[in-house]
Image (cartoon, grey):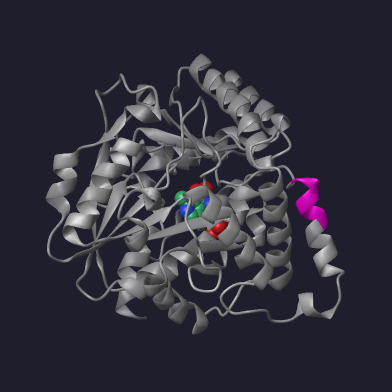
């Protein structure tokens, strides 16, 4: 095998999704909704599939024309700038491919990429496959035991600045964050932006949960800060936007001088994602464009629905003595399991999650999977719950947690 694959053969989703299936566990592990996407977008997909020959054939490599047009219009309005549908957007096979193309396009052997911990696990192997070196900087809880919200996890500006070197090519940010749920405030993003400008670094901004914020937290696009459009690749996901993770439609948006390189990777590897799925996502975005900000908008309804599920899971965890960190955004909530701690070889959270699946029939995800190998041992005391689930699923999880208590 190629050297670039060394040490990245294990994958948390492959391992724990299989385990959850084997034990038929109540699944609050992998992040996907166990409810259907909204009717309007399901209907759009059915219509696309039934809509004659063209929907079953290849479309434009860099994105189905109706989709790039509406994405440009939609995000142009959000960002308050003109976005060129033909130059500034690349439609990908999920946000995963947008990330992969970004690293392949921008990172050379020996380049450094700054990653903020905890991070969505694929960033590290993707940097490695591109020949780069990941450099980590942690979000730290303000004071241990007192951090009850994801807002209490802070990036130290001095520590961050200390990670920039002449070899730094890019920084990856993820807001709202997976697994913590932190929504970076404008001031926090400004610190990152200033360093990107000062050191001439590209920002890869993973915003797949951009519509899912709670309790008034506001999602800010780092590309909207002065001087940042020119050096930011913003990544999104129709899976997360429309609760259709299996469709695998994502995108990257950025200035043409950067996007042209992502397109080179894409045209020579993937070419494009399913035409009918892109068509349906285009219809979905057109609808959302037309009703933006109204109570009809799915992008408004979904976070309202998830807000309740989130509070409900938090209360349930609290009642059984698992202290949750209340997320400001996203699909997930992490909870402290240190009160139940013991000492053995495999990371405690991994063992705990396996025990929970096998013995109790409840699947979650160990949070140390979202840390670098160097720092994993310091973060074994949390597990991650996905609350984007039917109430029946949340009920079943609650029953399990209560009984065991
Ligand atoms: N980024 C983050 C932070 C994620 O949680 C995920 C997984 N949903 C992705 C990217 C990949 O998204 P997609 O399913 O669209 O490939
Ligand atoms: N992003 C989802 C999560 O964090 C799932 C990713 C995957 O299954 N590969 O749970």
Q: Nearer the viewer, residue 255 or 57?
A: 255
Classified by dominant secondary structure, the portion drawn in magenta counts as helix
Residue in front for this viewpoint, 348 or 344: 348
Q: Is 402 or 200 nearer to us in this picture?
A: 200
**Residue 311 highlighted magenta (yes or no):** no
Inspect this view and state whether residue 372 appears: no
Residues in magenta, as a range: 38-43
Q: Residue furthest top?
A: 319
Which residue is painted at 30% across and 55% down in the image? 227
- For residue 303, which quarter of the picture? top right
Query: Residue 235 appears at what percent x and percent y?
Result: 47, 58
Q: Residue at x 79, y 54 (%)?
A: 42
> Along the horizontal axis of the image, is 11 left or right of 69?
left
Q: Position of residue 27 (x, y in %)?
A: 61, 40
Asked if residue 41 is among those painted magenta in the image, a careful observer would answer yes
Residue that protrudes farthest toward the bottom in the picture: 268
Residue 258 as seen in the image, left or right of residue 26 = left
Q: Can residue 252 be seen at all in this image of the molecule?
A: yes
Residue 49 point in image, percent of width and height: 82, 68
């Amino acid at each position: 095998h190629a050297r670039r694959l060394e040490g990245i053969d294990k994958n948390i989703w492959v391992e724990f999704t299989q385990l959850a299936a084997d034990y038929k566990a109540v699944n609050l592990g992998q992040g996907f909704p166990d409810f259907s996407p909204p009717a309007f977008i399901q209907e759009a997909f059915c219509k696309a599939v039934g809509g004659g020959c063209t929907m079953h054939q290849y479309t434009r490599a860099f994105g189905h024309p109706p989709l790039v047009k509406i994405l440009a219009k939609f995000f142009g309005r959000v960002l308050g700038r003109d976005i060129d549908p033909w130059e500034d957007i690349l439609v990908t096979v999920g946000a995963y491919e947008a990330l992969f193309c970004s690293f392949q396009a921008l990172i050379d052997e020996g380049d450094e990429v700054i990653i903020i911990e905890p991070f969505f696990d694929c960033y590290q192997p993707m940097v490695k496959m591109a020949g780069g070196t990941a450099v980590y900087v942690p979000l730290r809880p303000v004071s241990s035991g007192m951090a009850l919200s994801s807002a209490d996890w802070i990036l130290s500006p001095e520590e961050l600045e200390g990670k920039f070197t002449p070899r730094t090519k890019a920084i990856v940010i993820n807001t709202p964050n997976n697994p913590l749920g932190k929504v970076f405030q404008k001031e926090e993003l400004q610190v990152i932006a200033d360093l990107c400008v000062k050191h001439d670094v590209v920002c890869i901004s993973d915003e797949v949960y951009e519509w899912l914020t709670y309790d008034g937290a506001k999602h800010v696009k780092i590309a909207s800060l002065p001087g940042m459009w020119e050096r930011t690749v913003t990544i999104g996901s129709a899976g997360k936007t429309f609760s259709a993770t299996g469709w695998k439609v994502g995108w990257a948006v950025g200035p043409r001088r950067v996007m042209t390189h992502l397109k080179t990777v894409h045209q020579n590897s993937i070419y494009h994602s399913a035409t009918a799925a892109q068509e349906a996502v285009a219809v979905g975005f057109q609808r959302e464009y037309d009703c933006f900000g109204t109570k009809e908008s799915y992008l408004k309804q979904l976070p309202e629905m998830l807000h309740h599920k989130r509070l409900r899971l938090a209360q349930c965890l609290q009642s059984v003595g698992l202290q949750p960190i209340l997320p400001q955004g996203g699909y997930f909530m992490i909870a402290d399991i240190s009160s139940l701690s013991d000492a053995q070889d495999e990371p405690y959270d991994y063992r705990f999650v396996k025990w929970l699946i096998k013995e109790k029939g409840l699947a979650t995800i160990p949070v140390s999977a979202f840390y670098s190998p160097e720092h994993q041992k310091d973060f074994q005391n949390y597990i991650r719950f996905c609350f984007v689930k039917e109430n029946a699923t949340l009920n079943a999880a609650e029953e399990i947690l209560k009984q065991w208590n």
